[in-house]
Amino acid sequence: MSTADAPLPPELRTRITDLAQAEHRPRAASVSALTMVQDHFGWVSDAHLAETASLLGMSPADLDGIATYFNLIFRRPVGRHVILLCDSVSCWIMGRDAVCARLQARLGIRPGETTADGAVTLLPIVCLGHCDHAPAMLVDRTLHGDLTAETAEQLADTLRAPTP
Amino acid sequence: MTITDRPLTSMIGLPDGPPDCAAYGRAGGWQAVRRALRDMTPDAVIDMVTASKLRGRGGAGFGTGQKWSFVPKDPAATRRKYLIANADEMEPGTFKDRMLLEGNPLQLIEGMIIAGYAIQAGHGVIFLRGEYHLALNRLNRAIAEARQVGWLGENILGSGFGFEIHVHASGGRYICGEETALLTALEGRRAQPRSKPPFPQVGGLWGAPSVVNNVETLCNLPHIVTNGAEWFVSLGLGPDSGTKLYGVSGRVRRPGAWELPMGTPLRAIIEDHAGGMRDGYRLRALLPGGASTAFLDAGQIDIPMDYGAVEKAGSRLGTGLAILLDDRTCPIGMLHNLEHFFAQESCGWCTPCRDGLPWVERLLNAIENGTGEPEDLDRLHDHARMIGPMGRTFCAHAPGAMAPLASGLKLFREEFDAHIRQRACPLRHAA
């Protein structure tokens, strides 16, 4: 399934253009537009970056400077699910390294990589503001806390289960 | 709002979730915005907030009324002005604003209307960190409802004052919490801080007068306007007024955050509210208000958690949420974790920060892994001395990063020496 070079759907182009017009200057919509593209395709390809830049009246390099600046914009393909495992201080104290080690072993990948079946990408993230339930991770848009190696592993397994 | 000793959280944690506009009103909400817009001039609101001695809850502790007072009032300045809620909660160990955003978004909205009215800004922006998905949903729902009911929009309560709010979900960088970097991010640029002056109150977003206030700061406003400045002052136990969301993370029995009187003793927060250390663990040291505050020793917990007392003890109140280091976790490992964060989150604009912080991280990594040399300690001291003081780097990021390091070098001297002497971590971090 290679969608990296497919043009942005007309509906998405319209939403980006509308957003840019609602802003004081079109470039103010940069992060929001990149997020919309990513929500649709999972990541931001070179072709989609260039198309988005043209909608915002920016050069691709200018927009790429923003895309690569922010932690949550992905410029490389990711899996169907993204695990963002907190690596900040409270989670570290509460044993996030052991959680990470188990996830790596179970998924067969290191942080920054995607499983061969394209199901899961594992990434570190800065403090998720869930420190009273450390260690914590965000799976797509859902926050999970009080993790142990076992519960994290079980969660990862559900992400790899075949979807109907 | 009924007079209560925990105004910020009285509507949080209800079984039905955050209140809608009607429930919020039944519980005492909207009184303040009615009072401000109908009975008070903008200047009277500023005076009241100044008299309340409310100080910024984002970490710097600047007087809120004073911050607002720098916004130009001359008629030529009636062009665009912005009131921005800093909801980019990314200070490691801090989870208080998420509680307010998810628990009672209308309280923030009411606070923003009041602040907007005080500085006569028609545009409100909530700069929210992108990972706070639940907060984003609840804020957008609350804003839509408030707009429908008429709490947002043109001519609120027939006062002639109009106010709109929109939410910006950030792409995620710690430096966006710095107010000038936040403004740069909102303008669609790499979020590098700006030099001051001009200060945001004069030349902020798109060059227009702008005030950036922390979420917790703004949430205090409805209660101050409703109950008065004197009431707010009386809530504090010491020199600082109001309540504060305090919190504890680490190996305590009940990690969490609680709204308590400003100036509550640190010992009471750790022992009474967090339940003390878990069995088998002793307190070694702590960061009182987030990753960018200096370590306090376990023997220093008999201080009140107010701005002055924590500073006198050698640290900062910061966000007020403490991170506890126990006796079975390696202090050098903890420092390495902290400096990894700061090195990664440096915006890269100025050399001392961009190059200095990764250097510090590498030195700490070497010491933790048993390959450190005695001279490495000199290099760490050099960094703390050179980029620790304000003014050596473009913004406060590097000084914030050096606060735990400089204090840690003193406090953990024996542990540093043991790592280098034994060529290993004597206290391998237990899982």
Image (cartoon, rainbow, N blue to C red):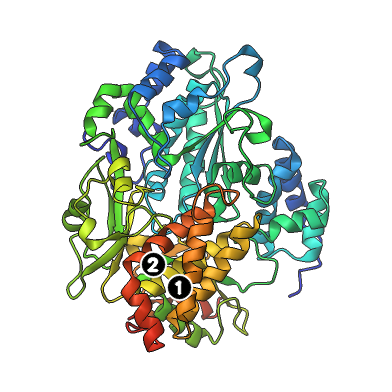
- Describe the element under mark 1 as helix, strand or loop: helix
B415 above or below A138? below
Q: CA distance from mark 1 to mark 2?
A: 8 Å
Q: Looking at the image, is mark 1 or mark 2 earlier in the sequence?
A: 1
Marks counted in the figure total 2
Image-based side of B265 in relation to A164, left or right: left
Quadrant in the picture for the C terminus of chain B: bottom left
Toward the viewer: B220 or B306? B306
Q: Chain of mark 2?
A: B
- Describe the element under mark 2 as helix, strand or loop: helix
Q: Chain of mark 1?
A: B
Location of residue B362 in the rendering, given as x and y in whole percent from the top left corner: 54, 75
Residue B354 quadrant: bottom right
Location of residue B115 in the rendering, given as x and y in whole percent from the top left corner: 47, 27
The numbered mark at residue B377 is 1
The numbered mark at residue B409 is 2
Location of residue B146 in the rendering, given as x and y in whole percent from the top left corner: 48, 31
Toward the viewer: B369 or B266? B369
Location of residue B7 in the rendering, given as x and y in whole percent from the top left corner: 28, 35
Residue drawn where x is 56% and y is 52% of the image:
B175
Residue drawn where x is 62% and y is 46% of the image:
B193
Type of the residue with mark 2: Leu
Residue drawn where x is 58% and y is 64% of the image:
B356
Q: Is residue B244 visible?
A: yes
